[in-house]
DNA sequence: TGCTATACTTACAAAAAAGTAACTATAGGC
DNA sequence: GCCTATAGTTACTTTTTTGTAAGTATAGCA
């Protein structure tokens, strides 16, 4: 099966594969959410603490989308008060090298920025 | 200089370094634009062809922002009709490994999707 | 009996992003 | 003299995203 076009490695039907990735993790906070999930299972209110810049509504929405895309697993415990645990699926774990590299780039970049570079 | 907090490797003042990266390349089409620039210098109308999903207005806007962030260089030739060439700066080129990995992930992911996985 | 905690949902409002279409300048060709 | 091409800009509208605030359910504790 040939999924590549003739031009520059972009598959037919898409301008570029990167567009596909951006559909999955393109939200403003999705990579951040995924990055935190690399540290293990997280509960909803943990994210509220870990991602102070984002609202509750945004979190639920992005978590649902990540779940729909098969990157995040949502485990509901039928208790009161409610308990829900989020974790990466196998699919989601394939993003780990990418997320680590994103983080690494940003750390270096921030050091440069704080030097006034 | 210690830019790390105590929790999970995230620097003080930010929830997470990944947020910094997303500020730079977080736009829907920015990684796509940058990816195409890895192939060398591009002119404006080339992008219109390479990124058929995006409008002219979006392209100029994203290209300006990438320029402001020091990732893209814009070279204007004072000719008629106008000629403008876009290329990656040294800073922009540091993103290449990341962009390649994004592309690679997406290609694998698409193959899986086309198998009905 | 009333308060707390968790993980939401919903309605509404505000802000940001994006699309559309028209307009700009001007060298060179017909 | 008019048309074409490039790389935009601008005004206006529409869509999407995001925020805010209030409401839901219910076990356990005081």
Image (cartoon, coloured by chain):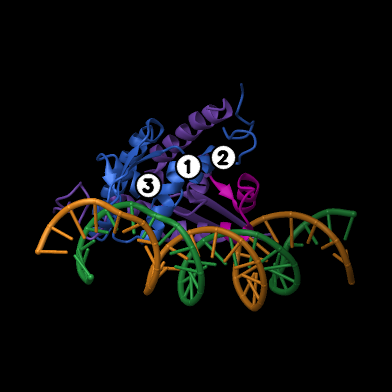
Chain colours: A blue, B purple, C green, D orange
Magenta segment range? Answer: B41-59
Q: Earlier in the sequence, mark 3 or mark 2?
A: 2
Picture coordinates of residue C14, whole percent (x, y): 46, 76
**Residue B68 vs residue A42, the one in the foreground:** A42
To which residue does mark 2 refer? A16
Is residue A53 positioned above or below B7 on the image?
below
Label annotation for residue A68: 1
Q: Residue drawn at (65%, 46%), measured in percent from left and top?
A: B49
Check disc 3 and report its element: helix, strand or loop. Answer: helix
* Chain under callout 1: A
Q: Is residue B92 magenta?
A: no
Pointer 3 with pointer 1, Cβ within 8 A: no
Mark 3 / mark 1, whichever is N-terminal: 3
Looking at the picture, how far across and down is residue B73, in whole percent?
47, 54
Mark identifier at residue A31: 3
Q: Is residue A51 left or right of residue A27?
A: left
Asked whether residue A9 appears in the rendered view, the answer is: yes
In the picture, measured across the screen, residue A58 lies left or right of residue A2, that is: left
Q: Is residue A25 left or right of residue A51?
A: right
Residue A28 in view of the camera: no
Residue A117 is marked as none
**Separation (CA) of disc 3 from disc 2:** 20 Å
Whole-Å distance between the Cαs marked 1 and 2? 22 Å
**Quadrant that contains the N terminus of chain B:** bottom left
Q: Residue at x 64, y 34 (%)?
A: A12
């Amino acid at each position: 099966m040939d999924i590549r076009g003739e031009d520059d490695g972009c598959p037919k039907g898409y301008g570029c594969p990167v567009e596909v990735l951006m559909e999955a993790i393109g939200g403003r906070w999705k990579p951040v959410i995924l990055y935190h999930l690399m540290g293990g299972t997280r509960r909803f209110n943990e994210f509220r603490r870990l991602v102070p810049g984002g609202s509750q509504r945004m979190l639920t929405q992005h978590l649902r989308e990540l779940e729909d895309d098969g990157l995040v697993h949502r485990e509901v415990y039928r208790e009161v008060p409610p308990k829900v645990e989020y974790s990466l699926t196998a699919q989601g774990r394939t993003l780990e090298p990418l997320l680590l590299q994103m983080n690494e780039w940003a750390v270096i970049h921030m050091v440069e920025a704080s030097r006034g570079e």
